[in-house]
Amino acid sequence: MQKEQLGRTGLNVSVYCLGTMTFGNETDEADAHRQLDLAWERGINFLDAAEMYPVNPVSFETAGLTEEIVGRWLASRKPADAIVATKITGAGSSAVQDGAAISGARLREVVEASLKRLQIECIDIFQLHWPNRGSYHFRKAWGFDPSHQNRAETVAHMTETLQMAQRLIDEGKIRHFALSNETAWGTALWARLAEESGLPRVVSIQNEYSMLCRLFDLDLAELSVNEDIPLLAYSALGAGLLTGKYAGNVIPENTRRARSPELGGRITPRVFEAVSGYLSIANETGLDPVHMAYQWTRTRPFQCIPIVGARNVAQLEHLLNGTDLVLDAPVRAAIDKVHRAIPLPF
């Protein structure tokens, strides 16, 4: 698999990243380790975890279990070129006692706990799962209201967090600092404060991105290009919608939708019209819709690395079989045409 430098980090990462959020819930440890083995056999050297994983559901009792499963694999296989990313849970999460917000002190606590669970000495990319002040992600765009935000408090929080990140870098516990579920204004402010104070620069942003969710395409895309802050794209299959398995508004057994019928707010009156448009393009061109959806993220005018996730090793093998696909100009134009006709379907 092709590898490329991630932004300005100097890290040589595979152009697909393996997501692990199902490990410990929908995916048992044996299958999780088979997925990791397969990913490394296919050239993936980049994996992403989080303090709050596994998901579906998220709970205080299971938080950290995914990192433990990944840690036992890392300890047993010792892959020399592994690039490991993980995250601190944001404010209000049921995975954290009392829904504690991110702070400098909690950052240190979580980094040290993640290091122990992952059984490594240094985390390559440590990310904030979402900002304390909230954002428009997770289907909150329709009612997004930033009027409650306090800029001075936000600047103070960011400065404190960056100062702690610097100390953790100096101690060799993390290599780089990054964001997730951020906005253009938030990311720009993190970058400016770091530059002005000589503190760690944001190296990437992990946001939802797919043919069904293209919020990143405007202001964040401009920021990404000009500041060399790549996108790590999660939910590139739209929580499974772009596979076609829910077409016709069905809910197959043993699927993510069986556990979460609304797919976190993604089931809307217009979503299946959009899905039908994208599935038609795949059918008419003889493309696998899964392969088309993932490879489309690699065509964007900014650095974009999709995070691939699977409930079992068979699903992972299927999606990795499409990593060499090249989408030609007519296919990309057809995708843009559907997007223009049915933008933001959820």
Image: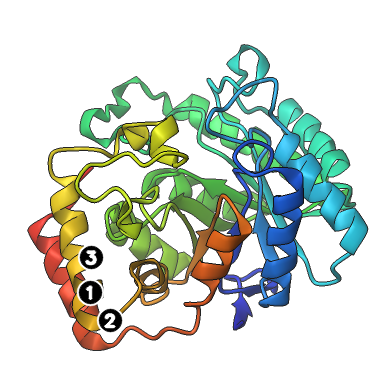
Can the viewer see residue 173 in this picture?
no
Location of residue 260 by image quarter: top left
Residue 171: x and y in percent read 89, 48
Between residues 95 and 241, which one lies in front from this camera angle? 241
Q: Residue at x 50, y 78 (%)?
A: 323
Q: Which residue is mark 3?
A: 279
Q: Which residue is mark 2?
A: 286
Can the viewer see residue 119 in this picture?
yes
| Local crowd size for mark 2, using a 10 Å CA cut-off: few (<14), some (14–19), many (≥20) | few
| Local crowd size for mark 1, using a 10 Å CA cut-off: few (<14), some (14–19), many (≥20) | few
| Residue 162 placement, left or right of 146 | right
Q: Secondary structure at mark 3?
A: helix
Type of amino acid at the residue the image marks with label 1:
Asn
| Residue 172 placement, left or right of 62 | right
Quadrant containing the N terminus is: bottom right
Residue 72: x and y in percent read 86, 49
Q: Which residue is mark 1?
A: 283
